[in-house]
Amino acid sequence: MSDLVTTQLQNGLTCSLPANSPLARLLKTQRTWVGPDAKERLGILRAATSVAIVGASPNPARSSYFVGTYLLQSSGYRVYFVNPNADEILGQKAYPDLASLPEVPDIVDVFRKASDIPSVIDDVLAVGAKTVWVQLGIWNEDAARYGEENGLTVVMDRCIKVEHARFHGGLNLFGFDTGQISSKKGLR
């Protein structure tokens, strides 16, 4: 008889399946980790005063450069750039690692490949940061669970720039049709 695996479905129910069944293999590849909802993400962004961008690039064509530009210009956050191969990014000192920062950041925004996320989480835990924000398009479910098991708040596969702009009424400034017309100021 085949070993059984217990799988949690997206609706919260669990079921046991033979480990070698096609359905068990398919479900193993499905995303079951969810992370903070929109209200919780807003709370994270509102509570933060500093953001460290791990994997920041001095190349204007890279998404980390664009996100850094946005955060410097459109938020009140103290923004730190972490890249061991750069001295300066966007006119700011670049740091070789999280341990070199002048403070423990509230949010560590990560622009690294999915396989690097566990080591970044180890670095975040070592410096005492509380939130890891893994950028849009990067997914490592095991790393997210590992981070949460060690007390971190983990946001994954979401762009901090898009989320910040969304909550502060600035998506239209970046080419997103929000479908809303308002004379009200954004959230502060």
Image (cartoon, rainbow, N blue to C red):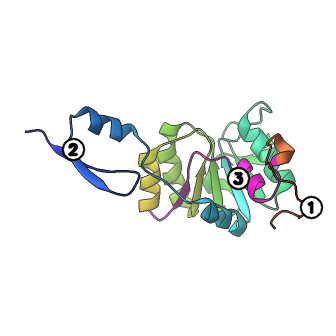
Asked if one can make out residue 91 in the rendered structure from this viewpoint, the answer is no
Write down the residue under mark 2.
17
Write down the residue under mark 1.
183
Q: Amino acid at mark 3?
A: Glu
Of the image marks 2 and 3, the number of the one nearer the N terminus: 2
Q: Quadrant of residue 103?
A: bottom right
**Please, what secondary structure does the residue beneath circle 2 have?**
strand
Horizontally, residue 27 falls left or right of residue 124, namely left
The local crowd at label 3, few if under 14, some if 14 to 19, many if 20 or more residues have their Cα within 10 Å, is some
**Please, what secondary structure does the residue beneath circle 1 have?**
loop
169 in magenta:
yes
Cα separation between marks 2 and 3? 37 Å
Horizontally, residue 56 falls left or right of residue 110, namely right
**Of the numbered discs in the image, which one, if any, rests on residue 163?**
3
Counting from the top left corner in percent of width and height, residue 138 is at: 56, 40
Horizontally, residue 125 falls left or right of residue 19, namely right
Q: Residue furthest left?
A: 1
Residue at 41% x, 41% y: name it: 30
Q: Are marks 1 and 2 in contact (CB under 8 Å)?
A: no
